[in-house]
Image (spheres, rainbow, N blue to C red):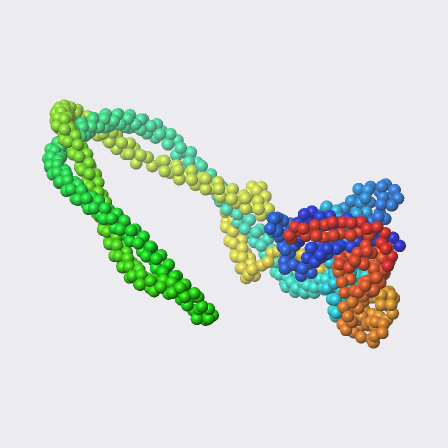
Amino acid sequence: MEVKMYLKKLQLNGFKSFADKTTFKFEQGITAIVGPNGCGKSNIADAIQWALGEQSSRALRVNRLEDLVFNGSRSRKSQGYAQVSLTIENPECKDRDKKEEEEASEEVHFGGNGFSVPTSITLKNGKGNPVVISETSPDSGIALRNLKDLPEITVTRRYYRSGESEYYINKQPVRLKDIVDLFLDTGLGGNAYSLIERDKVNLVLTSKPEDRRFLFEEAAGIMKYRVRKIEAMRKLEDTQTNLLRVNDIIQEVKRSINAIRRQVSKAERYRRYRQQLKELEAKLLIADLCRIKKERDAIKEELEACRQNEEKFKKDFSIAEAEVERLREELLQKEKELRERREKHYEAVSSKERANSQIFILEERKRNLSQRESEIKEELERIEKRTGLIDEEIRQAEVEMKAIEGEIVKSRANIQTLESELKKTELELKEAESMEKDSICLCCTVCVWREDRDKNGCFLEGKRFREIEKIGEGISGPVKSIHENIKKLEQKKEELLKKLNEERLNLALLEERLQVRQNEQARQQESKKELLHMLEEWKKEMSEIPRASENLESQLEEVKAQIEKILKQDRKEREELLRYEEAYSRARDVLMNEEERLKEMRRARGNEERLKELEIKEIEFKLQTENILQKLKEMGQSPESLETPDNEPSEIISREEIERETGILRQKIESMGEVNLVATEEYQRLKDRYLFLKKQTEDLTRSEEHLKKVIEEIEKTCRTRFMEAFNKIKKNFEDIFERLFEGGEASLCLTNPEDPLETGIEIVVQPPGKKLQSILLLSEGEQTLTAIALLFAIFLVKPSPFCFLDEIDAPLDDANILRFTKLLKEFSSISQFIVITHNKRTMEAANILYGITMEEEGVSKVVSVKMGEPVPA
C-alpha cells in the first residue's frame, strides 16, 4: 500500500533555538532526528504542533508565546518574529488526467449539506486553477478526500514579538480557524494522534477513560460532526430564543391593536368636527373679506386727495431746505477758518511753553555743572590722600617681607644643618647596630660550642678551648658599651627629629606670613592702580566742564531770542482770532433763524402724517386680504365666491349664527382632549406587523423541528461511526499487542456502552506470564509498548499523512526495540514516520537521519544523512 500524502518539508525561522532559516526535507518512509540532550530536537515537534494550530503555551513548553521567538545568545541578537511552514504533498494529484486542465475555473468547496456560509479561501492547484476552501461550515475541515484536490499544501504560521499573529495557506492570508478546520478529522492537528510525545504516551494511558475519546473520535472522523452538532445546537438555542421573543412581541402587538381601535374611532369623530368647523370658519373669512374690501376702497379715495396736497408742500419745503443747506455750508467754512486760526494761536502758545521749558532745563543743567565741579574737586582731594596712604602701606609691607625673607633663609640653613647632623647620627646608629649584631652572633656561637661540649662529651684541645673562652670574655664588655652607645644615638636622633620638625613648622609659618604680605601688597598695588585710573577720569571730566558751561550759555541766549519772536507772533494771531470769531458768530445766528423757520413749516405740515397713516392702513388691508385668501385656499374654497352680493342685514344674521355654531363645535373638540391623529395609520401598521410576526413564528417553528432532526441525525451518524471505528481499533489493538508482547492479551472496553457519544474507554492488558492488571501497574517499557500498540491500531483504521514520535522508544530494551522497529517499517508503507530518538536500533531502521547540534551556544544547527537500504531486524 503506497502513501498517498506525506510531510514534504518543514521550514523554521527564528523559532525557539532555530535562529537561522532551517529547512527539513522529508521523504516517504522513516526519518530519524538525533542529537544530544538540550540541542533542540523536541523544538521540531513543538514547531509542527504550533503550525497545526496549537495555542497552549504549556503544550509548547514555554511560559508565554513570546518565548517561541528566538531570544538571542551571547553572540546573536534576538529575532523579531518566529515562523514555521509545513508543506504536505499529495503525489496522486500530479497523476490526474487532462480533465483538470480543461476545467480552468474548477472549484472544490469543502462542506456537505450542513450549515455553510458563502465566504471562502481561494488557493491554486498544481495546474494553477483555483481551489476554494470554505471558511465556516463545520464540514469544511480538509479531510483526506478533499486534500486530493491540492497537489501541495503549505501552512505557515508567524508570530511577532509584539503579540500579532499571521496565518497563511499556500501564501494566502487566513484565520487560525481555517488551519484548524483544514486538518480536522485527518489525524493531524495539535491534539491528534499524529504527534506522540513521551509525556503524551503516559497521559493517554493514565488519564481518565473519558479523556481518551479524542483519539478514537479523530480516527472515527466524527470531529467535524461534533463541530456541526455544536453549531446546530447553537442555532437551535438561537431559534428557540427568537421564537420566545417573537411570541412576546406578538402578545405586545395584540395589546397595542386593542388599544389603538378606540383611538381610531375617536380620531374619525375628531376629523368630522374639524371639517365642519373649517367650513364655518371659511364663511366667516368670506364675510371679513367683503368688509375689508369696502374699507379699502374708502381709504384709496382719501389717500389720493392727500397725495395732491403733499406735492405742493414739497415744492415750498424744498426751497427752504436749499437755503438752510447753503447757510450750513457757509457756517462750516467760517468754522474751518476759525479752527485754523485757533490752531495757529495754540501752536504759538505751545512754542512759548516749550521755549520756557527749555530755558528751565538749560538753567538746571548749568546749576548741575557747578555742583558737579565742586564734587569732582572734593573727590580728587580724597583720591590723592588715599593714594598716599596706600604708598605708605606698600613701603611698610616691603620692609616686613624683607625681614621675613631673612628669617626664612636662616630657618632653611638651620634645617640643612639639622638634616646633615641627623644623617650622620643615623649612619653612626647603623654602624653601632651592625657591631652589636656581630657581637651577639659571636656570643651565641661560643654558647653553642659550650653546650655541644657538655652535651656530646666531646673534648677539644685545651689550647683551642681556652682561646674560645677568652674570646667570649673579651666580647661581653664591648657589647654592653655598644648597646649603651646605641641608646644614646637613638635619643640624639629623636631630639634632632624633634628640632627638625619644629624648624620645618617654623619655616612653613614664615612662608605663609610672606605669602599673606605678598597678597596684601598685590591688593594694595591693584587699589592704587584703580585710584590712579579714577583720578585720570575725574580730571578729564573736570577739564570738560568749562566748555559745557559755555555751550549752555550760548543755547540759553538763543532760546530767549526765540521767545521774544514767538511773543510778537502770538499778539498778531490773537487779533486775527477775535475777528474770525465775530464773523462765525454772525453766520451761526443767520443759520439758526432759517432752521427755526424750517421747523415751523414742518410743524404746520399735518397732511404728511395722515398720508403715512392711510398708506399703512392700505398695506394692512392688503395683507389681511392676502391672508384670508390664503386661508380660503387652504380650506379648499374658491375665490370666485366673493362675487356673490350680500345685503347688510342678512350678512349680520348669518355671521351671528355661524359664530354660535363655531363655538359649539370648538367645545366638542376641546371636550375630546388629546387625539391620536395617526391612530388609523398606526392600526394598519400594527395589523401588518402582526401578520408578519405570525408568519415568522411558523418559520421559526419549522426551523426548530428541522434543527432537532439534524442534531438527531448527527448523533446517529456519530454513534455509528464511533462504534465502527472502536470495534476496528479494538481488534487491531488486540492483534498488535499480541505481536509486540509475543503473547498476552489486551482489550478495549466502553465504560458506558449505552451512550457511545459520552462513554469513556478503558484499556485492559495482560502481558504474557502475568495476571490481568491495571495499566498503571505495568513497567514503563510495557506501558510504552501498550501505547504504541494503541497508536498503530488507530493507524490501521485511519492513517494520518505523517506521524511524529518524540523519544517514545526511550524506555524500551533491545528486544522490544527490534519488535517496535519491525512494526514501524511495516506501517511506513501506509504513513510517513518522523522519529526523535537516541536509540541506535531505531536509527538503523530510518531512511534518513537528521542530526541536531548546538555548535554555537543557544543556536540549533542541522546535519542530514541519507541512509542506504535499512538492515533487516
Q: Which sits in the foreground, 701 or 338?
A: 701
Q: Quadrant of residue 773?
A: bottom right
- Where is residue 623 shown, x and y percent of the image? 48, 42
Q: Is residue 630 above or below residue 340?
A: below
Q: Is residue 823 above or below residue 648?
A: below
Q: Which sits in the foreground, 264 or 237?
A: 237
Visible residue check, residue 523: no
Residue sitting at x 62%, y 56%: 678
Residue sitting at x 72%, y 53%: 852
Q: Is residue 604 left or right of residue 714?
A: left
Q: Which sits in the foreground, 524 or 460?
A: 460
- Where is residue 514 shown, x and y percent of the image? 21, 45
- Where is residue 271 shown, x and y percent of the image? 60, 55
Q: Quadrant of residue 589?
A: top left
Q: Which sits in the foreground, 698 or 440?
A: 440
Residue sitting at x 56%, y 41%: 643
Q: Quadrant of the C terminus?
A: bottom right
Q: Is residue 300 left or right of residue 771?
A: left
Residue sitting at x 66%, y 53%: 16
Q: Is residue 702 left or right of residue 577?
A: right
- Where is residue 533 shown, x and y percent of the image? 19, 34
